[in-house]
Image (tube, grey):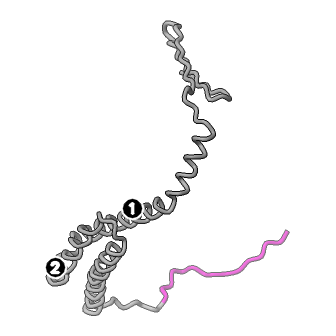
């Protein structure tokens, strides 16, 4: 199968069956080209709606960030939920439900607020994990290192190669 596009935008597709040697081709031409007036009208419409489109994009990006935060929060709760106090876990779950409610709306300030509240609640998990890790490190004894070097019979020396 070969595809050929010429300078005028005409596409020619040719298919050849190697076993039988038969060839078929089709030519695709643009029959509905836009006039210059239509192109200009479309450009003006795009400029008029540019701010709306930008705002819509920002809301969509914010929703994507909210979805990512929801996913990571659920994952964190699955992994470390048993190590978190039930009060903190309940608070995180409540904030998670709230974010799920507002993320599909168009109020970006409400989405941001819910994301911030959930992020702050999830940070408590990290704080508790670090505290537990620090207590565990204090509780366990650290093995003492022997500062004396062992003599393995190797003698260090310098040499110079003369030519």
Tell me the residue at 26%/67% (across/down). 75
Q: Mark 1 touching mark 2, by CB under 8 A?
A: no
- The x and y percentages for residue 25 are 54, 15
Tell me the residue at 54%/29% (across/down). 32
Element at label 1: helix
Q: Disc number at residue 60?
A: 1
Of the pair 86 and 111, the residue shown nearer to us: 111
Extreme-left residue of the structure:
86
- The x and y percentages for residue 20 are 49, 6
133 part of magenta stretch: no
Along the horizontal axis of the image, is 91 left or right of 153?
A: left
Q: Which residues are magenta?
A: 149-163
Above-or-below relation of 44 to 118: above
Element at label 2: helix
Above-or-below relation of 6 to 161: above
Above-or-below relation of 122 to 61: below
Label 2: few (<14), some or many (≥20) within 10 Å?
few
Label 1: few (<14), some or many (≥20) within 10 Å?
some
- The x and y percentages for residue 8 are 66, 28
Along the horizontal axis of the image, is 117 left or right of 26?
A: left
Of the pair 124 and 134, the residue shown nearer to us: 124
The quarter of the picture where the C terminus appears is: bottom right
**Disc 1 to disc 2, how far (Cα)?**
28 Å
The residue that disc 2 covers is: 90
First along the sequence among labels 1 and 2: 1
Tell me the residue at 53%/51% (across/down). 45
- The x and y percentages for residue 102 are 27, 69
Above-or-below relation of 84 to 64: below
Along the horizontal axis of the image, is 53 left or right of 83?
A: right
Most common SS among magenta residues: loop
């Amino acid at each position: 199968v070969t595809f050929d596009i010429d300078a005028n935008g005409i596409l020619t597709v040719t298919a050849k069956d190697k076993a039988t040697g038969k060839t078929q081709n089709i030519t695709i031409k643009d029959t509905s080209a836009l006039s210059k007036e239509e192109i200009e009208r479309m450009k003006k419409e795009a400029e008029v709606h540019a701010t709306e489109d930008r705002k819509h994009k920002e809301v969509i990006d914010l929703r994507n960030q909210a979805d990512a935060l929801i996913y990571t929060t659920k994952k964190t709760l699955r992994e470390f939920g048993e190590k978190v106090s039930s009060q903190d876990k309940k608070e995180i779950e409540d904030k998670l439900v709230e974010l799920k409610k507002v993320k599909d709306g168009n109020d970006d300030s409400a989405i941001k607020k819910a994301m911030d509240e959930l992020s702050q609640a999830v940070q408590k998990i990290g704080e508790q994990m670090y505290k537990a890790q620090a207590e565990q490190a204090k509780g366990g004894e650290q093995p003492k290192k022997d500062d004396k070097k062992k003599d393995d019979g190797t003698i260090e020396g310098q040499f110079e190669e003369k030519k």
